[in-house]
Amino acid sequence: MPSPFEGQLNRRTAREESALENFFRWINDWETVKYLGARYPRSRKFEQEWLAGGDPAYGLAQFIAETLDEATPIAWVGLHSATPEDRAASLGIAIGDKSHLEGGYGTDIMRTVCRFGFEMMNLHRIDLTVFDWNTRAIRCYEKVGFQHEGVLRDGMFKAGRWNQLVYMGLLRGELILEDR
């Protein structure tokens, strides 16, 4: 059985302060933040406190994704708002290291974290929202099995305009573990 912490290209690790400079740079970089709900610049202290913010738990399982070959932090990913009654969580991901936007890293991270959610947290459902114009992410989510479930019209005001949010969901048993 493969490790629920490793994919083919990445491994998920605990949040460590050694990643502070990467995270501080990424969260204040418009090319990364434009894909997220985040709006405001963040301080080093804020990022340091987030990284040191305690162990992951069922309701908030947050990790750093790093490359297998060089152990380089490239992204952060988390399963948020998990509830044992519904066995559901919302997924958030951001690849901050732009040199890893291609090459299958996003797909591998998504497969790994969803597998973790189903196998280690006993989730039944994982959902996410994505801007309708973020076609790269939508293709990635579809590739691992996420289904379109709806659109929230004018769901978020960001960058001077209203943006549509696409809701997508993945149920246990729908995860596609390899490219077809």
Image (spheres, rainbow, N blue to C red):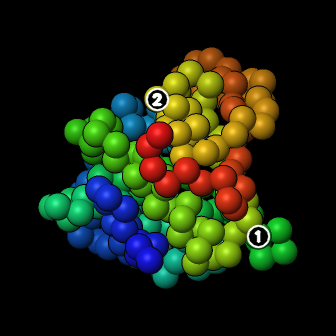
Task: List the residue tagged with mark 2.
Answer: 136
x 15%, y 61%: residue:
70
- Callout 1 amino acid: Arg
x 69%, y 61%: residue:
172
Of all residues, the one furthest to the front in this rendering is 180
Residue 20 image offset from top left, x and y in percent: 28, 62
Picture layout, residue 116 above or below residue 96: below
Residue 41 image offset from top left, x and y in percent: 43, 43
Of all residues, the one furthest to the top in this rendering is 161
Q: Quadrant of residue 158?
A: top right
Q: Nearer the viewer, residue 120 or 42?
A: 120
Q: Nearer the viewer, residue 73 or 10?
A: 10
Q: Quadrant of residue 83?
A: bottom right
Q: Residues within 10 Å of mark 2 (few under 14, many from 20)?
A: few
Secondary structure beneath label 2: helix
Report the number of numbered marks.
Answer: 2
Q: Which mark is residue 87?
A: 1
Left or right for 31, reference 68: right
The Cα–Cα distance between marks 2 and 1, rounded to whole angstroms, is 28 Å
| Quadrant of the snapshot with the N terminus | bottom left
Q: Earlier in the sequence, mark 2 or mark 1?
A: 1
Residue 69 image offset from top left, x and y in percent: 17, 61
- Callout 2 amino acid: Arg
